[in-house]
Amino acid sequence: MPPIEARGLSKAFGPRQVLEDVSFSVEAGQVFGLLGPNGAGKTTTMRLFLGLLRPGAGEALVFGAPLADRPDLRRQVGVLLEQSGMADRLTARENLAFYGALHEVGRETIDDRLGRAGLFDRADDRVGTFSTGMKRRLGLVRATLHDPGVLFLDEPSSGLDPAAQAEIRGLITSLARQSGAAVLINSHHLDEVERICHRVAILDRGRLAALGEVEALRRGAGPRRYGVRLAAGADRARAEAVLEAAGAGNMAWEEDELVLSLPPGLAPAELLRVLVGAGIGVEEARYRTRSLEQVYLQAMGRATA
Amino acid sequence: MNPVLVVARRELLALARARSVIGAGTLVGLFLGGMPVFTAIVTGSGMGGVYLQAPVLGVFLGYLFAQQAFLREKQDGTIETMLASPLTLPALWIGKVAGCAGAAALIAVACTGGALVAGALAAGVPVPLTAGLAVHLVVLVPLVSAVGVGVLGLVQLLLGLRENQILNLGLVMGLIALFSIGQVVAGGVPSPESELAAIVAMAAVLVVLHRLAGRVDRERIVRTIA
């Protein structure tokens, strides 16, 4: 049983369908990214999992049950929503003590986590005096204070500088790896998702536009793409003709790199041997994968290549 | 720790930080609550006003402390995180009621008690504190304050934490009017029987409000959040 699972999840607000037949699952120890533009249904999906909204159809299951029906399961869930969930009037320690008491976590653990997040010196300062980055770090400490088995993070690195973003990424990755937590992340930061997520789902106007492992999505369907950079002065037209004769297809120049499809059964080494055999120098050759941004744009129907 | 106590403690901490609200509450307590009691003792105009003043003050102070207590969770962006925590809505509601009403009742009773002592000293008479008045102050005033805060809180939850000051004030004034009418019907100084009836009625209202808080739909609140 996956710790997080959406089965045919749909939700409408009045006549507006915001989520339609969305299914995916997140395994223990896995970081799953939910991508999509504003209004795609990411936050609604998270709220459905948290039992804050009722699905119109389908199920949002956490440890095999809807959280709305099993409030006891909330003890195993950590949440960091778009706002960090901290009362500005209270100090960092008071805020954590509140959530710690709800999760039966003691002061020692709170102090330890504050120390690890580099916030121990500010523990008795009001959260209202904290910077956005500090609030975000504190929010992550709160969300993970009770070592949850499932973690929902909405834009975890929003408003953070690059160093703080890297820190948050490290925290999330180590949490999933060390404690085996299943982590669901909503994010606009494709770079962040690409770095830490094992699998992603791309939502477009409430529908699942793409789903799969990050590497598989980047590789894409169909024959693998290969890029060849010729040595200076090499005859481009001749190189194309030689490669075409060898079976390469879909050739196109991207600046000074010839991108092509390798037919099944033709190894890259064979391709290089043909080129070199024809007296055409090769400077560099590599498999081409798309960036997650390209995958995303293609899923959104805005692909340019 | 019991979740209700956890919420109540947090509410008291937040209130303690809102010094202007506490200061305003204390001024209201001294001048609108304490002064009439002091005058009644000094002029010897009877204890009926004392019995009415303390609960009315408790309700008004409860309103003062609670009008932002629920709404603030939405403004601070904390309500969604709280709703996603193991905290139930009835526990959240009653914890906030306990925190706000506790502070309101404390100030109301302190101001009334202080005015009783000050009035007695000024008039050169013994402090008119009977067992009936002690029960009134220690039991009924906190209960009435809790009902006031509870009604406000429940209505705010039902409205999805949308602000409606006119409705808030209307509810509090309505409650004060109801209590005043009850006091008039009971006549001057209430009898032990009418006092007991008021205590039971207030406790029953709190139980009903608690049940109703359990029926509030989280979606109603969350859908008002952008």
Image (tube, rainbow, N blue to C red):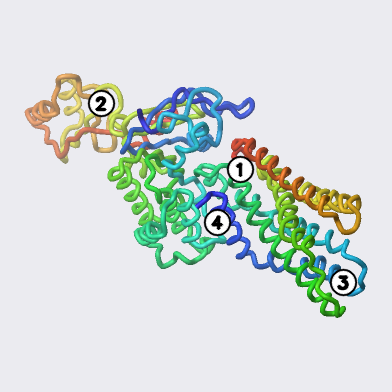
Say left or right for B118 vs B149. Answer: right
Frontmost residue, B153 versus A212:
B153
How far across and down, in percent of the image, does residue A34 sit? 42, 35
Mark 4 residue crowding within 10 angstroms, few (<14) / some (14–19) / many (20+)? many
Output the chain of dot 3: B
**Type of amino acid at the residue the image marks with label 3:** Ile
Q: How many marks?
A: 4
- Let me know if marks 2 and 4 both belong to one chain: yes
- For label 3, the residue is B41
Alpha carbon distance from label 3 to label 1: 41 Å
Q: Residue at x 42, y 55 (%)?
A: A137
Q: Amino acid at mark 2?
A: Met
Front disc: 3 or 2 = 3
Residue A258: in sight, yes or no? yes
**Location of the C terminus of chain B (image quadrant):** top right
Foreground: disc 3 or disc 1: 3
The reply to the same-chain question for discs 3 and 2 is: no
Q: Residues within 10 Å of mark 1 (few under 14, many from 20)?
A: some
Q: Quick one: label 2 or label 4, which is nearer the N terminus?
A: 4
For residue A251, which numbered disc appears in the image? 2
Instruction: Tell if the residue under mark 1 belongs to the same chain as the one under mark 4.
Output: no
Q: What is the secondary structure assignment of the residue under circle 2?
A: strand
Q: Secondary structure at mark 4?
A: loop
* Numbered badge on residue A87: 4
